[in-house]
Amino acid sequence: MFEGYAQIAIFVVILVALIKPVGIYLARVFNNERTFLTPVLGGIERGAYRVLRVNPEGEGQDWKAYARSLIVFSLLFWILLYLILRTQGIQPFNPEGFGSGPWDLSFNTTSSFITNTNWQYYGGETTLTYFAQMAGLAVQNFVSAAVGIAVLVALIRGIISRSGKSLGNFWQDIVRIILYVLLPMSIVGALFLVSQGVIQNLSHATVIHTLSGGTQVLAQGPVASQEVIKELGNNGGGFFNVNSSFPFENSSGLTNMFEMLLMLIIPASLTYTYGRMVGSQRQGWAIFSAMFILFIIGVIVVYIAEQHGTAAQHAAGVHTTAFHGSTGGNLEGKEQRFGIADSSLWTAITTVTSTGAVNSAFESLTGIGGAVPFANLSMSEVVFGGVGAGLYSMLLYVILAVFIGGLMVGRTPEYLGKKIQAREIKLVSLGVLFTPLAVLLSAGLASATELGKRSLYAGINPTGFSENLYAYLSQANNNGSAWAGYTGFLQPNAPGNDGAFGITFANLLGGVVMVTARFAPILFVLAVAGALAGKKVSPAGLGTMRTDNPTFVFLLIGIVILVGALTFFPAILLGPIANGLTGRLF
């Protein structure tokens, strides 16, 4: 196991080393300062403002105007993507002659990509044209990621504002985030992936002849350009059905490490950006520490569980080659190229962020290892989380922790000099509880109805319940990863298999859950930002509770666990924990 821990440690060291320089650069972009890319991109930026009729030097937007712009922007891209998915038969770059899928699948896919979820009820290489992949999905990967970051920037401005109402200008934020952050990083990343063997072409599928005399069809396509923004923007939707376990998306151990860094680099660096923008770097490091502790616990638990294997494997005397000649552990559903350590690390990263990309099969995790993705998602995307979305969700918990801490010491709660009062707490509570409520209601509806049960491969048992619960945990948290047994296609052994209504039910319910669980919390976050922007700053006194020390870090962790994870603890007991105690694989 030493080699595995060494790989994890190397990854962590590289990540931490990148946080400061990336965080400083992001702060310069969000503060509308000049960067080293301004001479190259400044003209394009000014041209974009002219097209959008935006005056970056003019008065900013209050939270309501910012929210309206965000909703209109997202709605327009929803309509555009839906039209692209419904017109595949007449599109260029369609060498395989694909047509459009069912309307309800298009609705689900559109809702999925517009919300940064990238939940996929289809196999990309057998369903979508190259045009739909590039002009539809890849573009939306940039747009949805930029929206999440823009909301965070607006919240930070609300926190640091001095008796004002402006949260900045949404259109300016979107332009600068895409031009100066997502696009240049994606270009460099895509070139690196191509150099390592990730494909990028517009060719027909290739028919190859195997050594046994058979034939196999290998899909082609513009993969690298989509793969990099899929990870960098915490989108997660794969060009291929098996996602990042396929060599054309993730060719080696080096690309595997690179793609894991892509998933975490922006969410982790944003904590440093936050500290820089609020004028106290200790604030950013405190939030990073809380996130990192919860993250590393998940990594260790899933790695130990997978390295140990299941009780059934030990009872049967099953021994597998874990990695580089060592024996033991559960390699079921994992790539030999990556082994247990890198698969476990990826599992933790993709579920603490909102990425959802996979390099191994979650349903093949041990019972205890499989509980980690459940636990990570149950904390509602606050442990690093999606780009922007993770930090703004964590800041809601920070405000909640300040409020609870203030009540404990008998003082009016304050955060960075601003009093936290009833209005802010009501909005924070709604923002924190909306996603868990969406999960439990949708999973309960799907479990209690015949239409919902038709999407379960395993039937009504702990495995089937896990499939159902995880599907709506993933969709409501805009993650997109899945337990493979749950599908939008009618299962052959599902109860009441007499029609296609189960397909439409899963597609429509999932689409509605993804949209509401994405945009309702965003509105609450912007409302909190608006409420804080109008408050005056009070000087800190002797009784002011510090929010940048280890005591507050552990208070914050406790609040996240109590309010977030424990909401789902009974449900998790009925699924992955029950499987773990019986010694079964999923």
Image (cartoon, rainbow, N blue to C red):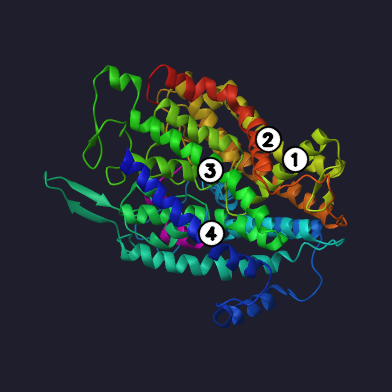
Q: CA distance from mark 1 to mark 3?
A: 20 Å
Q: Secondary structure at mark 2?
A: helix
Q: Earlier in the sequence, mark 2 or mark 1?
A: 1
Is disc 2 surrounded by few (<14), some (14 to 19) or many (20+) residues within 10 Å?
A: some
Determine contact: label 3, label 4, CB under 8 Å.
no
Q: Residue at x 54, y 45 (%)?
A: 292
Q: Earlier in the sequence, mark 1 or mark 3?
A: 3
Which residue corresponds to mark 4?
Answer: 19
Q: Earlier in the sequence, mark 3 or mark 4?
A: 4
Amino acid on which disc 2 is placed: Ile
Image coords of residue 574 (percent x, y): 53, 20
* Residue 446 vs residue 88, the one in the foreground: 446
Amino acid on which disc 4 is placed: Ile
Which residue corresponds to mark 3?
Answer: 352
Q: What are the residue bounds of the magenta stretch?
A: 121-141
Q: Secondary structure at mark 1?
A: helix
Q: Residue at x 52, y 52 (%)?
A: 234
